[in-house]
């Protein structure tokens, strides 16, 4: 299966987070045909990571199989392949597989592929993989970076806020306790928090991504909740960090649940590669046992998670060359 066909095939497999088993089965059946030894790593229920290698893997190419919802299939024109996951990250899987095929054809060994579940939520696949490292010294993670090597990625601080009130007939509001109004006050205070900035990483940013609550327009709401997600940056160690400040601000005012706290990550640059800073979070902070991290991949993060998600065919082809070159260079470092 050539690069574009493999990309389309992967995009047409529905692997919205939690529904990755079909994609894992496809890859675990496809990769042995390239001459790789393949195993699956159980994560939860039928969900599993896929690991494939030739020899003792000193360098591992990795990305994720899951996508955000909703699923929609592939289409293409002369310039792009479209569809959910085309750039985040099915096209990257295809490019890494194509790079592995090229390396194997040149007689290269001692490298691997690691395809993970759950990156779009809490990186549970990466966390499971981190308990079973294979001795690699470098891990090249694939995310949409326009084929530029990332020198850093922001963290991800995700809270759920739940507020309880008391229901009543809306004609007699004095008998109730409006949970939505209390939630709005809390969110207003959260939005007034001073967010840190960094000259390299840029500013922290805050998004109120989900709000729900209430029962009907004529009922005082007895419950409301919201999810907030903050893209974090490195902070001075001698001042309270953002997580601590949020927890102190909301103490006693609501039920506060921490869903994810992934730290920002500084990454190294290599000579001969274009670089950039990325504001998104990856699996890399959860893969600390897999070697020194690098981050690069085809496609633009600006179209990921959108109805117009797409990946340029030219970038897919270039990504194959980049992954082959990086793997060779890093293997040479290991052997030097």
Image (cartoon, helix red, strand yellow):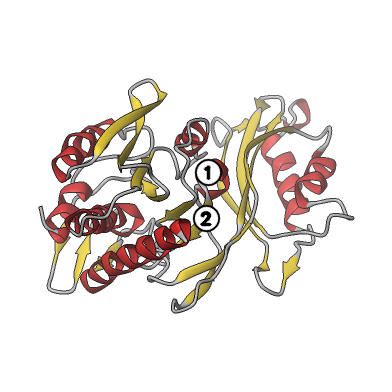
Could you say where residue 154 lies in the image, as x and y percent from the top left?
60, 59
Q: Which numbered circle lies on residue 287?
A: 1
Could you say where residue 97 lies in the image, as x and y percent from the top left?
24, 52
Which mark sits nearer the N-terminus, 1 or 2? 1
Q: Give whichever of 138, 63 is nearer the camera.
A: 138
Residue lying at the far top of the rendered structure:
45
- Asked where in the image residue 266 lies, by quadrant, the reply is bottom right
Task: Please count the marks in the image.
Answer: 2
Q: Residue at x 43, y 54 (%)?
A: 141
Q: Give whichever of 284, 205 is nearer the camera.
A: 284
Residue lying at the far right of the rendered structure:
238
Q: Secondary structure at mark 1?
A: loop
Q: Residue at x 75, y 51 (%)?
A: 190
Is residue 221 at all visible to an observer of this figure?
no
Could you say where residue 210 lies in the image, as x and y percent from the top left?
55, 45
For disc 2, the neighbor class at 10 Å (few under 14, some 14 to 19, many from 20) is: some
Q: Residue at x 56, y 63 (%)?
A: 279
Is residue 117 at all visible to an observer of this figure?
yes
- Asked where in the image residue 92 lies, by quadrant, the reply is bottom left
């Amino acid at each position: 299966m050539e690069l574009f066909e493999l990309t389309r095939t992967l995009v047409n497999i529905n692997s919205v987070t939690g529904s990755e088993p079909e994609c894992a089965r496809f890859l675990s059946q496809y990769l042995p045909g390239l001459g790789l030894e393949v195993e699956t790593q159980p994560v939860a229920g039928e969900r599993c990571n896929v690991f494939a290698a030739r020899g003792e893997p000193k360098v591992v190419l990795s990305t994720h199989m899951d996508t955000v919802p909703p699923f929609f299939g592939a289409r293409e024109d002369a310039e792009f392949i479209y569809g959910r996951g085309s750039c985040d990250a099915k096209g990257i899987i295809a490019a890494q597989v194509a790079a592995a095929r090229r390396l194997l054809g040149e007689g290269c060994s001692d490298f691997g592929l690691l395809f993970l579940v759950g990156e779009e939520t809490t990186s549970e696949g990466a966390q499971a993989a981190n308990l079973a490292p294979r001795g690699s010294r470098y891990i090249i993670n694939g995310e949409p970076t326009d084929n530029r090597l990332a020198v850093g990625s922001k963290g991800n601080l995700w809270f759920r806020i739940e507020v309880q009130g008391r229901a009543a007939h809306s004609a007699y509001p004095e008998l109730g306790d409006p949970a939505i109004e209390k939630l709005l006050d809390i969110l207003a205070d959260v939005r007034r928090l001073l967010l840190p900035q960094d000259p390299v990483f840029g500013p922290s940013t805050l998004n109120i991504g989900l709000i729900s609550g209430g029962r009907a327009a004529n009922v005082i709401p007895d419950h409301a909740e919201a999810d907030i997600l903050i893209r974090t940056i490195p902070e001075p160690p001698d001042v309270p960090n953002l997580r601590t400040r949020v927890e102190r601000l909301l103490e006693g005012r609501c039920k506060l649940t921490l869903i994810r706290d992934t730290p920002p990550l500084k990454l190294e640059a290599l000579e001969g590669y274009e670089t950039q800073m990325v504001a998104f979070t990856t699996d890399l902070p959860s893969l600390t046992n897999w070697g020194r991290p690098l981050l690069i991949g085809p496609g633009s993060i600006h179209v990921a998670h959108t109805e117009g998600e797409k990946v340029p065919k030219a970038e897919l082809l270039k990504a194959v060359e980049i992954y082959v070159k990086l793997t060779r260079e890093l293997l040479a470092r290991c052997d030097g």
